[in-house]
């Protein structure tokens, strides 16, 4: 269940990311002007806020990748305030502008990945408050696209995610949460028999199992503990 950058099938993962992006764009183009201003599944955010976040996320990742290409260090965001400001301003765009923003920002990120040399995929970069190989940005972006597609509340659900993509999302959720300070310990068991531990070692930690989609939903804070089976009590999880 562990991830190693130089063992990742980058071409396959990039194709999954492209397909997830195309599916997202195919759904967002059908959202009405009125519905863009409606609530998303994320508290306090409209669908327009979710779309603006996705576009700015692509720009932030592109900056990091281009920094690796150029040999410079680039922060994911200048700061929380500027990130929030950019999302708020982006959410004020017209539906057509939002669609174009989603499309062009994703394309620019894909172009940045094209510029990486093979040996640069292992370069360590900082995002999501941790150091990861730059290759992990592809996984993180795939997760962002799929999970926020669900958050848009436009008819797409985790049950609609293809099995291969869902498995990679599960691996990424586990990798992200594995070393987070204060993370409640638990043992994750996947349907194919793999297992992984999240949080500090604890013999009393519950074992959590379920479908791949159920585990992704619970780990990412998109579904309640009802989506999984546990040997112990599970509290609510924050959205990631």
Image (cartoon, rainbow, N blue to C red):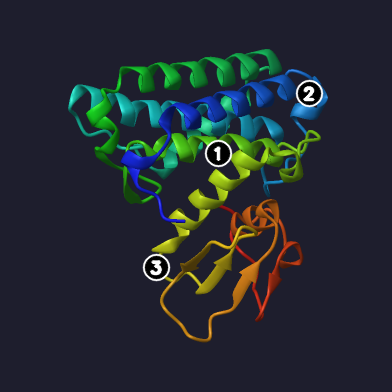
Which of the 4 quarters of the picture holds residue 101?
top right
SS type, badge 3:
loop
Distance in Å between CA atoms under marks 1 and 2: 19 Å
Q: Which of these two is toward me, 165 or 79?
A: 165
Name which residue lies at 53% across and 86% down.
204
Which residue bears the numbered disc 2? 31
Residue found farthest to the left: 71
Q: Is residue 100 left or right of residue 198?
A: right
Residue lying at the far front of the rendered structure: 192
Image quadrant assignment for residue 152: top right
Q: Is residue 195 above or below residue 144?
A: below
Residue 144: which numbered mark, if any?
Answer: 1
Camera-side residue: 148 or 203?
Answer: 203
* Residue hosting label 3: 181
> Which quarter of the figure has residue 67?
top left
How far separated are the C-alphas under marks 3 and 2?
A: 39 Å
């Amino acid at each position: 269940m562990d991830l190693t950058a130089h063992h990742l099938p980058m071409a396959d993962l990039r194709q999954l990311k492209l397909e997830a992006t195309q599916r997202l764009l195919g759904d967002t183009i059908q959202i009405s002007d009125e519905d863009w201003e409606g609530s998303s599944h994320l508290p306090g955010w409209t669908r327009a806020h979710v779309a603006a976040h996705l576009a700015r996320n692509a720009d932030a990742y592109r900056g990091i990748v281009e920094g690796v290409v150029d040999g410079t260090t680039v922060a994911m965001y200048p700061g929380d305030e500027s990130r929030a400001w950019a999302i708020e301003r982006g959410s004020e765009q017209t539906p057509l502008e939002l669609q174009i923003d989603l499309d062009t920002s994703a394309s620019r990120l894909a172009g940045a990945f094209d510029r990486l040399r093979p040996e640069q995929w292992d370069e360590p970069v900082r995002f999501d408050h941790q150091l990861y190989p730059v290759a992990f940005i592809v996984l993180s972006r795939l997760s962002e696209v799929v999970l926020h597609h669900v958050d848009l509340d436009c008819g797409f659900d985790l049950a609609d995610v293809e099995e291969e993509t869902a498995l990679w999302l599960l691996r990424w959720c586990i990798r992200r949460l594995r070393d987070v300070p204060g993370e409640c310990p638990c043992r994750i068991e996947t349907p194919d028999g793999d297992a992984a531990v999240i949080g500090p070692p604890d013999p009393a930690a519950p074992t959590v199992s379920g479908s791949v989609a159920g585990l992704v939903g619970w780990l990412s804070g998109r579904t309640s503990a009802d989506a999984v089976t546990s040997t112990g009590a599970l509290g609510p999880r924050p959205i990631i």
